[in-house]
Amino acid sequence: MRDVILVHGLWMPGVAMSALAARLARAGLRCHVFGYAGRARPLEAHAERLLRFARERAPEGAHYVAHSLGGLVVLHALDADRALSIGRVVLLGTPAQGCLAGRRLARSRLGRWLLGASEPLWRERSPMVDRGPLWQRPEALGVIAGTLPLGLGSLVARPYGPGDGVVRVEETGVPGMTERVVLAVNHSGMLVSARVAAQVVAFLLTGRFAADG
């Protein structure tokens, strides 16, 4: 399987995935970027659009790589359609267990506006977590978390703990995931990191992260 669908995060456009897409392309993978307005519509609407996009762009199936909120979109979509043919999935800094920084940001009117319709997904007990295990498919799911705390989260949430500046390492865990690797990168920097890209390629091709990660 050569096709890969890339899904960006909350405040980033699809072009933010360009550097990662270029590195995946050099590994022989064919990338398709799914764009969506993260704060404008609820998770279910984005997931439904993603499923339509996947059926049109990669009818034979695809791998998925998603950053931040995009990971929740992917998890919801693939849980909603268990019959969809997929390969492997990699999530980058996804707040699967909620997000302390998001909850602190939502205390203010400006913060709630910035989060928009995505605000419930950043809570400690989001609707997705309350449903039970987040990954119940047989395909391999890999998670990459960062430990370079440069970002909004480290400013609005103290004490912050190990994290990428937005999402803490403990918040990236997905019950049922195959493997998680922790790298010294920050939240946005994951998208331009050669080291992250190498780990994504390794997981998509083998189902495991590189041992020297």
Image (cartoon, helix red, strand yellow):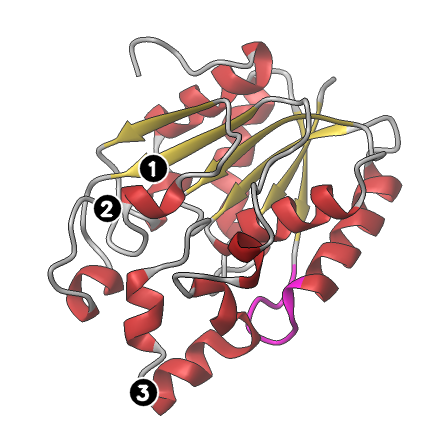
User: Where does label 2 land, which residue?
Assistant: 163
Any magenta on residue 152?
Answer: no
Question: Considering the numbered disc 2 on the image, is that residue within a helix, a strand or a loop?
Answer: loop
Question: Mark 3 or 1 closer to N-term?
Answer: 3
Q: Residue at x 84, y 50 (%)?
A: 52
User: Which residue in the protein does label 1 denote?
Assistant: 145
First of labels 2, 3 by sequence position: 3
Q: Is residue 40 above or below residue 4?
A: below
Q: Label 2: few (<14), some or many (≥20) within 10 Å?
A: many
Q: Marks 2 and 3, how far apart in space? A: 23 Å
Amino acid carrying mark 3 in the image:
Ser
| Residue 128: percent from left, percent from top | 57, 55
Residue stretch in magenta: 36-43
Relative to 202, is 139 on the left or the right?
right
Contact between marks 1 and 2 (CB within 8 A): the answer is yes
> Closer to the N terminus: mark 1 or mark 2?
1
- Residue 8 lies, in percent from the top left, at 54, 51
Q: Where is residue 81, by image quadrant? A: top right
Question: x%, y% of residue 152?
Answer: 25, 64
Name of the residue lying farthest toward the left: 159
**Foreground residue among 18 and 148:** 148
Q: Amino acid at mark 2?
A: Gly
Quadrant in the picture for the N terminus: top right
User: Which secondary structure lies at badge 1?
Assistant: strand
